């Protein structure tokens, strides 16, 4: 019996690969299969906090920004639920997180191409029956081991909880006293049983947990503590022009930059995708002000301390029970301190998984100077010695910029991949999506007064008044700018399960940006040490 043959096999079914499946559903001639280890679609179940919404407009669903007529849109789902008029009169712009999960689950259940309970074990290079290069995708299901063949594979990389390196050993020993935000709801009763809780991490997840505890747990005599390595509890950049960093135009610009420039730029863009929504910060302030009367800020029973980095910790047995002593350093005042607490919630974000199942094709992957895969503008990994297509979703932060984990670009990326796989325009994508021109070359396209665009010699870049004779044209100048539909030929981080939930090999392929925090889980809150930038095929 010959193995199934598909044009495209997706590994992992989170929002991003689900968007791909939904858009592919409109093209019956393209044979697609999507495999997911979990028994059903589930997206960050541990963070479905009451009242939490996605920090993104409802139009950034699975399909609407590419195909608003799709039967798999959020508005179509609301219509099927008999709730479209209620949505209209409610004038809601941001979708409740639990509702987005239910919408995605409904779409996944309707798509015949989505198979759950299938754990992919290996992807190997193969020659297909028609002579094309492709892959053999091996997986385990409830009926035993299976293999399917595919001309193209799309990896929904998924994420896993990040633990700061300095707290790894403590997490292994602390067990019941420490939880990651990924587990927050499943361990809420245990967390609330303590009279002293510390939340570490100042991204959206940390803020939502602090707000939830303030509303439903914090009483006189209890102490809530919110600590972060960031210099402040900062609001996310959400200005109308600032959001243009999440457009395909910006991805074009970012992708064309040299590797070192991309890395430097990305390191300073945390507020674009890892900070807190202004609305959540305002609600926290309201709760604090309520508690500050009449005794003032010192009487609230809440400690907010930014600028401190965890450098270690230990378990301490006391008459009232085992507690945690956490050690911190405040670099700006050059001081250290110890924090005693009954529970520690690590809202320290997520990092990309390292998919060992790709080990058999690891030698085919071309890499940059830091060992990261080279990924083309159409999200295709550059391979050596094969014409088979390997694509990634939410694993190209280092090549495509801050929009990578953002739900708002999910449909666009999915359409780009489908166009690339089909070798034609299945979906017409806009030539320009931003008012901002992110480079002189792009600005010159629409402004005839901008001329003589040339790249300065490397030693003179950024110092125009000392510019020497222009060197050879930069690729960004030579290529047609602002055409996203045209494919182009901080610190130590530690990820660990430590019993944390949500670490299945390919669960939830697209933790989006603005997905409850701007990044489907941001890929890392402030204290996750670094934005993940590698994808190790080992």
Image (cartoon, rainbow, N blue to C red):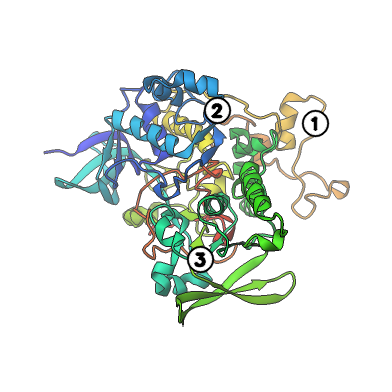
The reply, left or right, for residue 459 in relation to residue 393 is right
At a point 18% along the width and 39% down the height, the residue shown is 3
Q: Position of residue 312 (x, y in %)?
A: 54, 75
Name the residue tied to disc 3. Answer: 195
Considering only order in the chain, which callout, 1 or 2, is on the residue closer to the N terminus?
Answer: 2
Q: CA distance from mark 3 to mark 2?
A: 36 Å
Give the residue at x 46% y 71%. 168
Q: Compared to 192, does 89 lie above or below?
A: above
Count neighbours of disc 3 (C-alpha within 10 A) and say few if under 14, some if 14 to 19, many if 20 or more: some
State the residue in front, 244 or 29: 244
Separation of marks 3 and 1 at Cα, in angstroms: 66 Å
View extreme (front): residue: 294
Secondary structure, mark 2, is loop
Local packing at callout 1 (Cα closer than 10 Å; few below 14, some 14-19, many 20+) is: few
- The label shown at residue 451 is 1
Judge by depth and name the residue closer to the eye, 320 or 464.
320
Q: Point out the tag, 3 or 1, that comes first from the N-terminus.
A: 3
Location of residue 458 with respect to 148 vertically, above or below: below
Q: Earlier in the sequence, mark 3 or mark 2?
A: 2
Frontmost of labels 3 and 2 is 3
Q: Label 3, secondary structure: give it.
A: loop
Q: Is residue 425 visible?
A: no
Q: Residue at x 84, y 46 (%)?
A: 464
Gap between marks 2 and 1 measured at Cα: 45 Å
Q: Residue under label 2, please give it.
A: 92
């Amino acid at each position: 019996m010959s193995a199934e043959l598909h044009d495209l096999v997706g590994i992992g079914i989170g929002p991003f690969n689900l968007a791909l499946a939904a858009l592919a559903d409109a093209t019956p001639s393209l044979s697609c299969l999507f495999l997911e280890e979990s028994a059903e679609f589930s997206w960050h179940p541990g963070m479905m906090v009451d009242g939490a919404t996605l920090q993104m407009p409802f139009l950034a669903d699975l399909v609407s920004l590419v195909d608003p007529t799709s039967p798999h849109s959020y508005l179509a789902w609301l219509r099927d639920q008999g709730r479209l008029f209620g949505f209209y009169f409610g004038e809601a712009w941001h979708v409740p997180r639990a509702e987005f999960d239910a919408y995605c689950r409904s779409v996944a259940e309707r798509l015949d191409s989505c198979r759950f309970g299938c754990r992919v074990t290996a992807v190997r290079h193969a020659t297909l029956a028609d002579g094309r290069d492709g892959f053999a995708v091996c997986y385990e299901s409830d009926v035993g081991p299976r293999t399917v063949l595919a001309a193209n594979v799309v990896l929904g990389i998924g994420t896993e909880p990040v633990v700061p390196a300095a707290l790894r050993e403590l997490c292994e020993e602390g067990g019941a006293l420490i939880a990651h935000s990924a587990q927050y709801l499943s361990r809420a009763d245990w967390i609330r049983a303590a009279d002293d809780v510390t939340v570490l991490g100042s991204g959206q997840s940390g803020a939502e947990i602090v707000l939830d505890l303030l509303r439903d747990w914090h009483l006189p005599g209890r102490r809530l503590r919110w600590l972060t390595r960031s210099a402040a509890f900062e609001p996310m950049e959400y200005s109308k022009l600032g959001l243009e960093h999440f457009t395909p135009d910006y991805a074009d610009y970012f992708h064309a930059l040299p590797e070192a420039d991309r890395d430097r730029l990305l390191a300073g863009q945390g507020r674009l995708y890892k900070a807190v929504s202004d609305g959540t910060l305002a609600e926290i302030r309201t709760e604090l002000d309520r508690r500050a009367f009449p005794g003032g800020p010192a009487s609230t029973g809440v400690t907010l301390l930014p600028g401190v980095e965890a450098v270690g910790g230990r378990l301490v047995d006391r008459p009232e029970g085992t507690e945690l002593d956490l050690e911190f350093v405040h670099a700006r005042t050059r001081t250290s301190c110890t924090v005693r607490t009954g529970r520690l919630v690590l809202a320290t974000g997520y990092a990309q998984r390292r998919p060992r199942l790709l080990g058999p094709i690891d030698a085919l992957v071309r890499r940059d100077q830091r060992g990261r895969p080279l990924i083309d503008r159409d999200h295709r990994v550059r391979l050596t010695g094969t014409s088979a297509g390997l694509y990634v979703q939410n694993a190209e932060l280092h090549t495509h910029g801050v929009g990578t984990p953002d739900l708002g670009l999910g449909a666009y990326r999915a359409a780009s991949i489908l166009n690339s796989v089909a070798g034609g325009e299945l979906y017409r994508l806009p030539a320009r999506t931003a008012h901002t021109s992110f480079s002189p070359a792009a600005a010159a396209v629409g402004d005839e007064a901008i001329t003589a665009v040339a790249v300065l010699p490397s030693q003179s870049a950024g110092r125009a008044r000392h510019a020497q004779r222009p060197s050879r044209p930069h690729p960004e100048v030579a290529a047609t700018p602002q055409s996203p539909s045209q494919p182009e030929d901080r610190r130590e981080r530690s990820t660990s399960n430590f019993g944390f939930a949500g670490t299945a090999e390919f669960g939830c392929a697209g933790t989006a940006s603005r997905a409850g925090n701007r990044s489907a889980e941001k890929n890392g809150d402030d204290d996750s040490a670094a934005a993940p930038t590698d994808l190790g095929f080992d």
